[in-house]
Image (cartoon, helix red, strand yellow):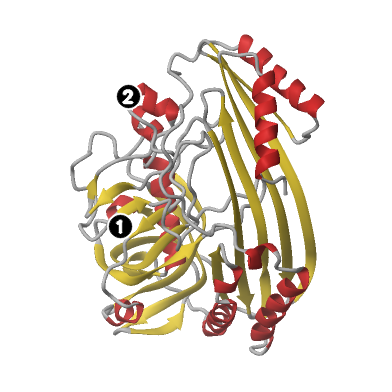
Amino acid sequence: MIGEEKAREIMRLALGHAKADQAEVVLMAEDSFLTRFANSYIHQNVAERNHSLSVRAVIGKRIGMAATNRLDPGEIKRTAGLACRIAGVQRENKEFVSLPGPQKEPASPAALCVADTVSFSAAQRAERVRMMCGRALKRKARAFGALSTGVAEVAVANSLGVERYNLSSDAYVNTVVMTDTGAGYGQGAHRDVRKIDFEGIAEAAARKAVDSRNPSDLAPGRYPVVLEETAVYTLLEFLNYTGFSARAVQEGRSFMGGRFGKRIMDPRITIADDPQDRRGFAFPFDFEGVPKRKIVLIEKGVARSVVYDSMTAGREKRESTGHAMPAPSYHPMAGNLVMSPGDTPLKRLVESTRRGVYVTRFHYVNLIDPMEVSITGMTRDGTFLIENGRITRPVKNLRFTVSVLKCLNSLAAVGNRSILVSEPGGYGHRFATGSRVPALKINSFSFTGGTDF
């Protein structure tokens, strides 16, 4: 890794070469390690070390950006100069007011970098994978998935005096276990790899793969559903994507617009973005170096607020909430969502259902209408029929088309625990995000078609 002292030195050097009215530097570095497995054996084991430096230059209201992954002094100077030249030929951005200045930083979440995660070796990853594959093989099933660990540095500085640095670790595992005709899914994430329940994840996925064998047809229609946390995560992600950004409200494409202070969901729904919650991927500042604040988005079903970066805040003459994405993405986004749990155990969600569908997770979900948060997709990796309070048989995966807002206004009960659900970063920089969500029971969920599997 680069280290805090060196990171600050690099950023100051870049700012010194940025001959602009204002300038911003974002430095990101990572050591990432990944073990993938398929058909119950490891087929890929890779390590990546990378870093990048981006410079945003502001001349009047013209903004330019340039980036590099070389950190020698000559390249830093070239990148800063290129950002300035790009700014010089841009059209004015009339919405731009200013980069943010220094702000008093709230108490930072502690222990974001865990030594045991940083030092977690390829052999240790292989041992966890061996155990997970073993659980599947005992049931004559096959395990597929990935285990990733790593450490990431994020540093931000600007010409107005902002200077921030953070070092954090994270670990993520997911697995799909498959039999001849069944499948089960499990996932886990934490900054401390020791706190991921690998055995519990493997066992639940393997058991579900066996239980879902030989699924039968179920006629499309409206059913009550019990959604596991991994399915609820998808609903929450589409709420975030479509409506929790100030940019979406300002552009008239958010379901929150014009409805602040009004009830838009069941009173049992409270959703906040909480960057201080260490049960999730807590983080102290955004990609403009602004301290993150807890923002209550939905309070007991009532629309309360959205998240801002400096650009969208300047448009309304208010302060950023610390939710800037890396430039040039001028679209603030919540990254630490928490949906409050209720008081009903998952077992009771099932027992209270006379006839309905139990869903593990969703797959291949796409947006239809952002104002209603209408989405369509399919169930996956464990879909079952509930009859008279019991899961009685697996059913073939179903296609659905629903409005997330209507679903959250057709709520029967909220699970009494929440878990961190995340997704692997895939391409791009390592930066851990995830949401804490409970299971839900929804009274009416529209399944529009079936599948052959």
Image coordinates for residue 262, horizontal then vertical, percent: 18, 43
Q: Secondary structure at mark 2?
A: loop
Residue appearing at x 65%, y 68% in the figure: 116
Amino acid identity at mark 2: Glu
Residue at screen point 64% across, 85% down: 135
Label 1: element kind: helix
Quick one: label 1 or label 2, which is nearer the N terminus? 2
Left or right: where 127 falls relative to 406 = right
Image coords of residue 273 (percent x, y):
38, 50
Mark sitting on residue 407: 1
Query: Viewed as shown, does residue 408 lie left or right of 148?
Result: left
Q: Amino acid at mark 1?
A: Cys
Looking at the image, residue 140 sits to the left or right of residue 157; the answer is right
Q: Is residue 404 above or below residue 35?
A: above
Task: Depth check: give the residue in front, 377 or 265.
Answer: 265
Tag 2 residue:
316
* Left or right of residue 343: residue 198: right
Above or below, 120 against 72 in this view is below
Q: Can I make out residue 221 in this image?
A: yes
Q: Establish if 342 lies above or below 350.
A: above
Q: Decide if residue 214 is in sight here.
A: no
User: Which residue is located at x 44 percent, y 13 percent?
Assistant: 94
Q: CA distance from mark 1 to mark 2?
A: 32 Å
